Image (spheres, rainbow, N blue to C red):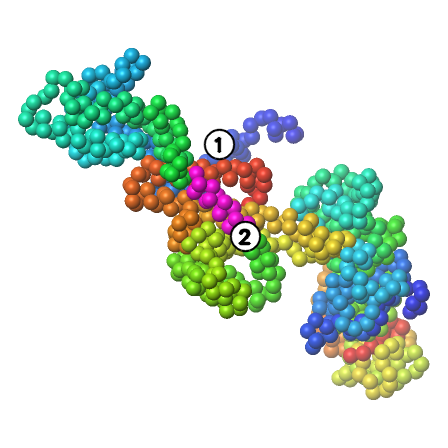
């Protein structure tokens, strides 16, 4: 009988294959389910998948400059650097023509891009352009473009600029990633470290990771007892406590951050109290804000609920009888906690930890306001390049690395704890 | 009942209050002998679980002392009492396998690995779960979890095992099967068991003695048969088994028996004098349904008529609800011998022996 069921295709009473019949019956439900989630799917594609895709694309995109200087770059690729010190005449001619007849706005944008590779490009092209425009106006096209350009600016006889052009002749470029890691190209096109004084990103990356890890640890240490109380107090107390935990959510982030500045500054509340208590002397006031300490304190407070809530939701369902059972079986309260209670909170700890860490690593407003000069995180530089230098390629690369770091942590977490162990409610 | 030297567990003048206003347990005195299976039976809120928790060490008596093996244990923390316990919802640790759950009490006692392994296996075999050691509790059925909880409470060879409504979450068949299993395990290893339940049939099945709790007081402490057949007050009579009641007033007392004049002039009943003191006392008479005979007269006394209000066919017997002396809930169990031909609305002749009627408090 069992064999019969497993080997031959099952038929319905009407003789239609069962699978086919089932599919037909389910089709309507599936369609309805799909239509129900479709708006959400669309929303996610438009607001999440597409922007991230665009960001990843921008982080390597070099097509704009390749559009402006397409002939120049095509000729450039034919240059045999072993044989000739300088590129052949065709390169100079193409460059002349593209600067002479190209769209001004496009050339301007390309110049900005060229300056990322090597400073000096902008002024070089600008002075050259001026001479080219003059010549074109007088209708005097040169016989020898190479000589004309070199006479317009003698840097055109300097191979280092020509070598630097080599970084831009492809439609994609890794330069933004190298820049985001404090690296650049030397004149031989090798990737090297930036000048010592221009290295800012690696330092900031390490600081960002460090502060995020610290914030996560502090949130865990501070959040665990609170979550435990929330889960175990009688209802009327736990409701009140829950309101205190949620209160920050009802207050503007800016207000909370500003409040921390008031609290922490040298003439602020905390220093005032410490001096008044005689713990600090008046000129020994602590520098608690506008540095890493300030960032750490403010971020811990602001992200604390994100640790407490997942922990609470997990602790709430751990039966109280477990601790009793453990003690009844002979375990001292500490052992019972360590062996029976704590392991059961791991899903909450990991959910909260991952949540806080991911939020912390990309945090912007709070470190920006209380961080001062050395409490700023990588978000600061992303915003800086986005708004001030308009170097969106570098922005995108920084963002992509941030995304990558998060994915690495996610992967590590999955390896060590297992993603199934996350529990938010 | 037993003197102190014989009792293994002794509750002495235990009072317990949580809020300083209401006593949950009042003046509890209870002796449990070694190897005995004692059940605390009572409705919810009667103080039985509180009593158990005091014995386990999770609650402190407000007054009085509990002795275990003649030593006072109020100051001993739960983890040093060496008392096993099966919790209401088993309290198996979900992150540990069955084996790890069972090894836990042995590990915290620093028992060597090989010995632990052996004891765990023995305990698992005892509850017939020898091959389930590597599973997690969530992968077991309710009945299997229950057995694991039982094995875990026994594996470290405690002096005493407490069970707090351990079968409450199981379905009826499984519950009955587990009752026998627990009883057999108790018979086999001879450990002292204190069992808490609100299910009287469970208590009757398993226990050597039953303490019936109500309102924080032990109403009666006896063996199951005595409890059923000779309840000492109306609460016990009502709580254990089915019970017909008739209210009246004592008019005459004659040694062990008395005569009761039923309210509203329904006649006189001869009954055993149990919980009444003197003439004129108000009393509630208790008669078990199976002790009422129909269609025959009793030469001594207690012959009445009842009108059939409802007949329910139950296979082995017919359950008749009658109006007897103004009581509309008077139940009689008629054995199904094929000769019963009465219909609803008929009048039946009823009688009962004076020895089967108990005059109790009201």
Residue A20 is labelled as 1
Residue B219 in sight here = no
Residue at x 7%, y 22% (from the top left corner): A140
B277 lies left or right of A50: right
Residue A218 is labelled as 2
Q: Residue furthest left?
A: A138
Q: Quadrant of the N terminus of chain A?
A: top right
A205 lies left or right of B305: left
Q: Label 1: few (<14), some or many (≥20) within 10 Å?
A: few
Residue at x 77%, y 59% (from the top left corner): B78
- Taking the magenta stretch, the answer to whether it contains residue A175 is no
Residue at x 73%, y 78% (from the top left corner): B326
Q: Residue furthest bottom?
A: B280
Q: Chain of mark 1?
A: A
Q: Between residues B303 and A72, which one lies in front from this camera angle?
A: A72
Q: Chain of mark 2?
A: A
B1 lies left or right of A211: right
Residue at x 80%, y 40% (from the top left corner): B113
Q: Main secondary structure of the magenta part?
A: helix
What is the magenta range? Answer: A202-220
A155 lies left or right of B294: left
Disc 2, SS: helix
- Taking the magenta stretch, the answer to whether it contains residue A215 is yes
User: Does residue B197 sit above or below A38 in this rendering?
Assistant: below
The image quadrant of residue B163 is: bottom right
């Amino acid at each position: 009988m069992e064999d019969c069921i497993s080997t031959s295709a099952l038929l319905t009473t009407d003789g239609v294959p069962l699978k086919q019949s089932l599919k037909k019956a389910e089709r309507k439900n599936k369609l309805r389910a799909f239509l129900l989630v479709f708006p959400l799917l669309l929303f996610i594609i438009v607001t999440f998948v597409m922007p991230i895709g665009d960001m990843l694309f921008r982080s390597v995109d070099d097509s704009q400059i390749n559009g402006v200087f397409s002939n120049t770059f095509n000729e450039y690729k034919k240059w045999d650097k072993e044989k000739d010190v300088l590129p052949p005449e065709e390169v100079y001619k193409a460059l002349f023509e593209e600067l002479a007849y190209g769209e001004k706005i496009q050339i301007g944008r390309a110049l900005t891009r060229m300056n990322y590779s090597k400073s000096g490009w902008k002024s070089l092209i600008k002075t050259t352009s001026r001479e080219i425009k003059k010549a074109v106006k007088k209708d005097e096209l040169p016989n020898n473009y190479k000589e004309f350009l070199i006479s317009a600016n003698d840097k055109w006889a300097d191979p280092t600029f020509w070598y630097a052009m080599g970084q831009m002749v492809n439609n994609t470029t890794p330069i933004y990633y190298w820049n985001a890691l404090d690296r650049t190209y030397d004149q031989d096109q090798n990737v090297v470290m930036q000048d010592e004084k221009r290295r800012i990103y690696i330092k900031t990356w390490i600081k960002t990771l460090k502060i995020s890890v610290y914030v996560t640890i502090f949130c865990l240490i501070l959040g665990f007892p609170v979550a435990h109380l929330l889960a175990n107090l009688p209802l009327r107390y736990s409701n009140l406590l829950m309101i205190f935990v949620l209160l920050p959510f009802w207050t503007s982030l800016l207000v909370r951050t500003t409040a921390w500045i008031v609290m922490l500054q040298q003439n602020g509340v905390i220093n005032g109290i410490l001096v008044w208590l005689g713990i600090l002397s008046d000129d020994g006031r602590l520098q608690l804000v506008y540095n890493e300490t300030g960032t750490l304190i403010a971020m811990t407070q602001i992200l604390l609920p994100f640790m407490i809530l997942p922990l609470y939701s997990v602790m709430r369902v751990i039966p109280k009888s477990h601790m009793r059972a453990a003690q009844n079986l002979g375990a001292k309260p500490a052992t019972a906690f360590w062996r029976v209670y704590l392991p059961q909170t791991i899903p909450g700890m990991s959910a909260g930890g991952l949540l806080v860490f991911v939020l912390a690593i990309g945090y912007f407003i709070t470190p920006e306001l209380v961080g001062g000069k050395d409490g700023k995180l990588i978000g600061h530089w992303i915003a800086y390049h986005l708004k001030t230098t308009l170097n969106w390629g570098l922005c995108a690369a920084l963002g992509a690395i941030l995304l990558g770091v998060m994915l690495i942590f996610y992967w590590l977490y999955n390896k060590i704890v297992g993603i199934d162990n996350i529990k938010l409610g | 009942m037993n003197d102190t030297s014989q009792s293994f567990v002794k509750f002495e003048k235990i009072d317990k209050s949580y809020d300083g206003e209401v006593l949950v347990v009042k003046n509890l005195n209870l002796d449990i002998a070694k190897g005995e299976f004692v059940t605390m039976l009572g409705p919810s809120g009667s103080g039985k679980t509180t009593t158990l928790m005091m014995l386990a060490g999770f609650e402190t008596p407000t007054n009085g002392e509990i002795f275990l093996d003649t030593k006072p244990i109020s100051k001993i923390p739960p983890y040093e009492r060496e008392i096993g316990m099966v919790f209401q919802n088993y309290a198996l640790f979900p992150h540990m396998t069955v084996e790890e759950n069972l090894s836990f009490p042995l590990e915290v006692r620093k028992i060597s690995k090989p010995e632990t392994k052996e004891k765990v296996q023995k305990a698992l075999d005892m509850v017939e779960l020898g091959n389930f050691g590597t599973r997690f509790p969530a992968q077991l059925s309710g009945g299997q979890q229950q057995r694991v909880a039982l094995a875990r409470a026994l594996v470290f060879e405690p002096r005493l095992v407490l069970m707090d409504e351990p079968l409450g979450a199981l379905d009826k068949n499984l519950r009955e099967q587990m009752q026998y299993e627990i009883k057999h395990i108790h018979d086999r290893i001879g450990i002292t068991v204190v069992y808490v339940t609100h299910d009287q049939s469970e208590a009757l099945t398993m226990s050597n003695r039953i303490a019936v709790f109500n309102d924080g007081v032990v109403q009666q402490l006896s063996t199951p048969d005595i409890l059923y057949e000779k309840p000492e007050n109306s609460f016990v009579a009502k709580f254990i088994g089915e019970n017909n009641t008739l209210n009246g007033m004592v008019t005459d007392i004659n040694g062990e028996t008395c005569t009761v004049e039923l309210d509203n002039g329904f006649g006189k009943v001869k009954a055993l004098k149990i919980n009444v003191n003197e003439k004129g006392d108000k009393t509630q008479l208790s008669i078990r349904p199976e002790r009422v005979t129909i269609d025959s007269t009793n030469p001594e006394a207690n012959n009445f008529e009842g009108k059939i209000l409802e007949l329910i066919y139950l296979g082995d017997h017919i359950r008749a609800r009658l109006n007897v002396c103004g009581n509309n809930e008077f139940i009689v169990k008629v054995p199904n011998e094929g000769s019963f031909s009465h219909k609803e609305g008929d009048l039946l002749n009823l009688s009962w022996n004076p020895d089967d009627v108990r005059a109790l408090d009201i």
